[in-house]
Amino acid sequence: MTADSPNLSLTHGAARERWGPPDACEGSVNDPRQRSEHGIEFNEKWIYFRPDGARRLVYWHRYDCRGVVLEAADGSTTPDSAGVETA
């Protein structure tokens, strides 16, 4: 998944079913400020803390999922396409 090809099949409800409520959020669906991180433009980010020290970052632009990234404890990142394809 890239910033140019958002996964529109992942909804807020599906993300909550799959991973539960986020541990932290930045921004909101109604936040007019655009942000960019890991090549993904968004206005809301959901953060899930994992037991191994990693974080799952779910990026939204309004209600559309723009991407999901796994950030390892060392700061390295990889796209989490498996996290959204089955949602």
Image: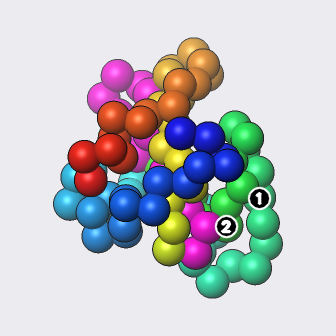
Q: Main secondary structure of the magenta part?
A: strand
Identify whether 61 is placed above or below 29: above
Q: Secondary structure at mark 2?
A: loop
Q: Which residue is mark 2?
A: 43
Q: Which mark is residue 35?
A: 1
**Residue 22, position in %: x, y?**
38, 57
Q: Given the image, on which type of amino acid does mark 1 rest?
A: Arg
Residue displayed at 50% across by 74% down = 63
Q: Which mark is residue 27?
A: none
Q: Given the image, on which type of amino acid does mark 2 rest?
A: Asn
Q: Name the residue nearer the viewer: 84 or 50.
A: 84
Q: Name the image colouring.
A: rainbow
* Disc 1 + disc 2, Cβ < 8 Å: yes
Residue displayed at 30% across by 29% down = 51
**Residue 27, position in %: x, y?**
64, 69
Residue displayed at 43% across by 34% down = 80
Identify whether 35 is placed above or below 1: below
Identify whether 9 is placed above or below 62: above
In magenta, the rendered stretch is: 48-62
Q: Name the residue nearer the viewer: 84 or 15.
A: 84
Q: Alpha-carbon distance for marks 1 and 2?
A: 6 Å
Q: Closer to the N terminus: mark 1 or mark 2?
A: 1
**Residue 48, position in %: x, y?**
40, 46
**Residue 35, position in %: x, y?**
77, 58
Total tally of numbered discs in the picture: 2
